[in-house]
């Protein structure tokens, strides 16, 4: 235990000291901390005590995702988004359903041992994109605002949308739907998950904004405690929505939007102070992922699993996005760029742990596919984010300049 703490502390110290330089290279934080997890886990020196199992992984990943969603939503630039609102709408209403359908169809071709509902679960687990892994693109000023805001909104909402879909297919796979028709079960889950999430996010964030406004006005918030309000609010939104039967992820994203629009005067100092906590949670999640899930994925490697993982990151994501964005006057590269930068990460890990706890007949296969997809996403999107974002931004700027001249 103490060796693990010392090793993790020293590595975090080293990385945080060099982060500014590392972030200019293809070595993302996710890559570095996943590698550390592999080295410190069973595949390496076996320093990390992992007896706590999937429960710890699930809780940490959920809280991390909650913080990331809240912070990213609070930073949405509505002025830029208004000029390109069709992008996230198309990505969510056209691209996401097509991604789910393509994932299900590919699963039928690759995994004949999985049941139909298990295939639907697999497609759902790998449909959400990850705001944390995509941060190198979303926060890169070289990328035009309309693409950054569109990808940010998409990553914030698609995992929340997929939550009721996941639980629907999980209930059907376990035979828990009973005599209730699948359509009625789906409507019930959507109304509960989305509706409760919306109400909780709006109410808690509105109250928090009022409280912070009063506190700032009277000088009650100290420099020491300014780091905590955003973190505490995100956790409160997530926990309250989950406890009431709703989607904590929806609550966090909506809560972040409310916070960002109503708390304009003090938004940036509060978000900036909380950013370090969110980053720390994210990197620790990648350490545990590298230590816990990489070894089983390597031990149970199979070509069908690798094939599905590769296609999940390419054809199954990029083709639906290309179709969804057709007709909006975008360059081909822009549609390919939006399709490629849909990394899989925290949401997929959370979904995989939830499904693993259900002990389905094909549960191991589902977990291994998700693990391989996330591994490839960490590497592929980490390596390509900075160079393609920079080159894409330059070409977009040149195109806009030529259009203005013409």
Image (tube, rainbow, N blue to C red):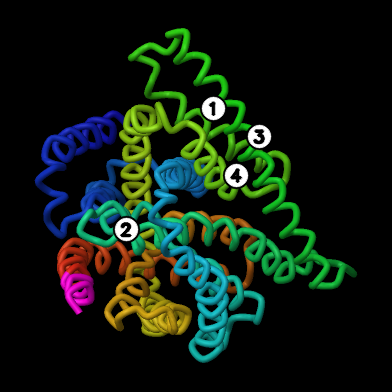
* Tag 4 secondary structure: helix
Q: Residue furthest bottom?
A: 109
**Residue 62 vertical placement versus 109 (above, below):** above
Q: In this figure, which residue is indicated by the disc labeled 3?
A: 203
Q: In this figure, which residue is indicated by the disc labeled 2?
A: 145
Q: What's the residue at 16%, 50% (across, down)? A: 23
The quadrant where residue 115 appears: bottom right
Q: Which residues are magenta?
A: 398-406
**Residue 248 vertical placement versus 326 (above, below):** above
Q: Position of residue 4 (x, y in %)?
A: 28, 36
Is residue 280 shown to the viewer in this render? Answer: yes
Q: Residues within 10 Å of mark 4 (few under 14, many from 20)?
A: many
Task: Of the two numbered discs 2 and 1 on the same chain, state the one appearing first in sequence.
Answer: 2
Q: Position of residue 211 (x, y in %)?
A: 56, 19
Task: Of the two numbered discs 3 and 4 on the same chain, state the one appearing first in sequence.
Answer: 3
The answer to whether 15 appears left or right of 57 in the picture is left
Task: Of the two numbered discs 4 and 1 on the same chain, state the one appearing first in sequence.
Answer: 1
209 in magenta: no
Q: In this figure, which residue is indicated by the disc labeled 1?
A: 209
The answer to whether 207 appears left or right of 394 in the picture is right
How far apart in space, not on screen, are marks 3 and 1 (Cα)? Answer: 10 Å
Q: What's the residue at 61%, 76% (across, down)? A: 120
How far apart in space, not on screen, are marks 2 and 4 (Cα)? Answer: 25 Å
**Residue 360 vertical placement versus 309 (above, below):** above
Q: Nearer the viewer, residue 331 or 10?
A: 331
């Amino acid at each position: 235990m103490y060796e693990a703490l010392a090793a993790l502390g020293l590595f975090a110290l080293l990385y945080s000291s060099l982060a500014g330089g590392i972030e200019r290279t293809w070595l993302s934080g996710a890559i570095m901390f996943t590698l550390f997890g592999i080295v410190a886990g069973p595949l390496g020196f076996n320093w990390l005590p992992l007896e706590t199992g999937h429960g710890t992984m699930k809780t940490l990943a959920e809280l991390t995702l909650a913080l990331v969603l809240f912070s990213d939503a609070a930073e949405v630039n509505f002025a830029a988004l208004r000029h390109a609102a069709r992008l996230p709408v198309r990505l969510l209403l056209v691209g996401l359903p097509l991604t789910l359908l393509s994932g299900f169809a590919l699963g039928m071709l690759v995994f004949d041992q999985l049941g139909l509902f298990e295939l639907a679960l697999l497609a759902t687990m790998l449909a959400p994109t990850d705001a944390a892994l995509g941060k190198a693109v979303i926060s890169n000023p070289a990328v035009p605002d309309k693409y950054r805001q569109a990808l940010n909104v998409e990553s914030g909402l698609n995992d929340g949308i997929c939550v009721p879909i996941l639980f629907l297919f999980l209930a059907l796979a376990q035979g828990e739907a009973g005599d209730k028709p699948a359509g009625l079960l789906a409507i019930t889950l959507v109304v509960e998950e989305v509706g409760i999430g919306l109400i909780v996010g709006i109410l808690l964030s509105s109250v928090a904004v009022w409280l912070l406004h009063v506190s700032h006005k009277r000088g009650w918030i100290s420099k020491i405690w300014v780091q905590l309000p955003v973190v505490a609010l995100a956790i409160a939104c997530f926990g309250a929505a989950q406890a009431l039967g709703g989607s904590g992820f929806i609550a966090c994203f909506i809560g972040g939007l409310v916070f960002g629009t109503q708390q304009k005067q003090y938004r940036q100092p509060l978000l900036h102070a909380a950013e370090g906590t969110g980053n720390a949670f994210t990197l620790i999640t990648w350490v545990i992922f590298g230590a816990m899930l990489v070894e089983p994925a390597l031990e149970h490697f199979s070509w069908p699993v690798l094939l599905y993982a590769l296609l999940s990151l390419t054809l199954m994501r990029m083709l639906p996005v290309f179709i969804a964005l057709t007709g909006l006057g975008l360059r081909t590269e822009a549609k390919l760029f939006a399709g490629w930068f849909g990394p899989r990460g925290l949401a997929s890990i959370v979904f995989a742990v939830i499904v693993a706890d259900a002990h389905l007949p094909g549960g191991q296969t589902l977990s291994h596919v998700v693990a391989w997809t996330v591994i490839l996403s960490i590497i592929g999107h980490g390596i390509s984010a900075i160079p393609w974002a920079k080159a894409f931004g330059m070409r977009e700027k040149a195109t806009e300049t030529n259009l203005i001249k013409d």
